[in-house]
Image (spheres, rainbow, N blue to C red):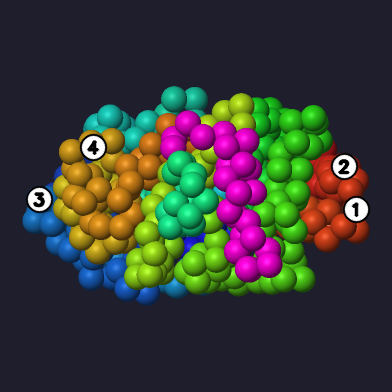
Amino acid sequence: MNRKLLASVGMLGIAALALTGCATPAADSGPVTITYTNFISNDGNEENLQTIVDAFEEENPDITVEVTTLPYADYGTALQTDLAAGTVSDVFDIEYSNYAAYQANGVLAPLEVANVDAYRQSLIEAYSTDGTSYALPSSFSDVVLYYNADLFDAAGLDYPTNDWTWEDEKAAAEAITDQAAGVWGDHQPISFYEYYKVLAQNGGQFLNDDKTAVAFNTPEGLEAAEWLVNKSGTVMPTIEQGQGTPDFDTNLFKDGKLGMLHTGIWVFGAVADVPFNWDIAVEPGNTDQASAVFSNAVGVSATSEHIDAATKWAEFLTSSDTMVQARLDSGWELPPISDEAQLATYLDKGAPANRQAVFDSLDGIALPPVVAEGQTEMQDIIGEELVEAQAGRKTVQEALDSAEERINAVIGG
């Protein structure tokens, strides 16, 4: 899954969509047609989605699913328009960054999930409020630590393990780095998505509990920011050397010039044919393990006239055997299920050998901090300020001070 799918979309106007006085629809009797609007199958997985639809309709002959697939770039605007006009589909895709606002404003129907245990607990809980599911996770991707095993061997180092810490990573990165030869030990983007994660790895949090102000300007937050920023020019390239440009880190790894790379499992295909040995591990933490997990989900409209049928489709789409096989066979992100046996074939699909790390990373996850208003601005501000520190125009503390002031002004703290 590309990280562009994690950007906030459609946040504007959600507060105006609060639904009041919605009558509970009567149970469906006789044949019904439900509608489903999605972006997850766009650009290559339309046939995979149709396979799931066909299997569902065969199992539920009284329910027909009408599918509308939109490009991701158009999806947020289209969904907002449909919600405002009262024409939203019975079932529709959402992202984690939008879940809280939709749920708070009554857009999503509470779901009576037939088998909650079918889902990984951390993922089903991400779309639950006060113990009730309001959406079902449909897929996930996470970030892991890639490493060049040949460079580790040349430096006489042991490979990363699940219990590595920042200190272990730093020591290995320093041993591998040979700037004269253009070989670097580590790469981790200086960005919002990395900062909130390393903050969690250091026992801190990005927002206060009621999400009215930031909570990162603390000793834990400073140490986390320094962990990222101080890599630049020591064990990873500087901005002047290309760091931060598109695909720079992946290409450096593919060229055999990078010992460790923090990025998502969506890069497996891009590095599959490199001429050296490589593998992955769970990302190291400092005081805690915390891996970035990015997911999509489906919700059922609170205004749907067929909530029972829509819920059946939402569950089938997100937890059925047909869905699992379609995703695993095609490499279409990963299913959000808890049954390790069903996922066994994924572990045997070739490099990386340690695919188990993908699932081990879910033992401690860091979800993106989310606010009802100002999400994009919040993300941009912390990235801008940390890059200022990376470039040497501010100290790390000055960058956090400025980020705190700017973000609080945006989110209303």
**Mark 3 or mark 2: which comes first in sequence?**
3
Q: Position of residue 237 (x, y in %)?
A: 69, 63
Choose mark 1 or mark 3, whichever is in front. Answer: 1
Q: Which residue is mark 2?
A: 397
Q: Position of residue 404 (x, y in %)?
A: 84, 42
**Mark 1 or mark 3: which comes first in sequence?**
3
Left or right, 89 with reference to 7: left
Find the magenta span and give its range: 161-185
**Mark 4 or mark 1: which comes first in sequence?**
4
In the picture shown, does residue 174 fall above or below 178?
Answer: above
Q: Which residue is mark 3?
A: 59
Q: Which residue is mark 1?
A: 394
Query: Which image quarter holds the N terminus?
Result: bottom left
Query: Which image quarter holds the C terminus?
Result: top right
**Mark 3 or mark 4: which comes first in sequence?**
3
Q: Position of residue 72 (x, y in %)?
A: 48, 68
In the foreground, 233 or 299? 233
Q: Position of residue 56 (x, y in %)?
A: 16, 54
Choose mark 4 or mark 1, whichever is in front. Answer: 1
Q: Which residue is mark 4?
A: 340
Left or right, 235 with reference to 278: right
